[in-house]
C-alpha cells in the first residue's frame, strides 16, 4: 500500500527553515541530488518559505527552471519568475502603515 501511494506522488512541497535546510540554515550537500532524483521520477519539487522569492530561486539555481516556488509565507507563488498567485496589501493599508 505504501509503495502504491509513493508511486502516485506528483508534487513534494518542502518547508525550508527547520526542515530542508540543515542547522545554521545551510543548504544540504545532497539537496541538489534530491531535487534531480525527484525530477527524474516526474515529481515536482517545490520549496516553501517565508523567505523572498529571489533567495529561494538562487538556492535552487541548478533546478529553478520550471520549479514552482512558494515564497514570502505564501504571498508570492511563482514559476520561472512568473507570478502564479500573489497577495498584496491594499494601497490604502500600505499608506496607513507608512503614516504610522
Image (cartoon, helix red, strand yellow):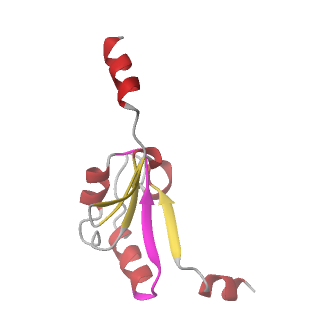
Q: Residue at x 43, y 65 (%)?
A: 46
Residue at the (41%, 75%) spot, across then down: 34
Residue 82 drawn above or below residue 86: below
Image location of residue 45, percent across then percent down: 43, 71
Quadrant in the picture for residue 66 = bottom left
Q: Residue furthest right?
A: 1
Total marks placed: 0
Residue at 50% x, 54% y: name it: 19
Please check the rendered image and state whether residue 43 is part of the magenta-colored stretch, yes or no: yes
Instruction: Say which of 24 and 99 sits in front.
Output: 99
- Quarter of the rendering occupied by the N terminus: bottom right
Residue extending furthest top?
100
Q: Quadrant of residue 3?
A: bottom right
Q: Which residues are magenta?
A: 40-51
Which quadrant, please, contains the C terminus?
Answer: top left
Q: Is residue 64 left or right of residue 10?
A: left
Towards the viewer: 91 or 30: 91
Amino acid at each position: 500500500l505504501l509503495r502504491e501511494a509513493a508511486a502516485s506522488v506528483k508534487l513534494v512541497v518542502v518547508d525550508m527553515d527547520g526542515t530542508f535546510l540543515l542547522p545554521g540554515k545551510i543548504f544540504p550537500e545532497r539537496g541538489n541530488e534530491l531535487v534531480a532524483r525527484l525530477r527524474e521520477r516526474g515529481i515536482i519539487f517545490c520549496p516553501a518559505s517565508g523567505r523572498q522569492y529571489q533567495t529561494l530561486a538562487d538556492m535552487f539555481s541548478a533546478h529553478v527552471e520550471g520549479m514552482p516556488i512558494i515564497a514570502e509565507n505564501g504571498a508570492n507563488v511563482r514559476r520561472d519568475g512568473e507570478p502564479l498567485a500573489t497577495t498584496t496589501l491594499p494601497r490604502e493599508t500600505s499608506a496607513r502603515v507608512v503614516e504610522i
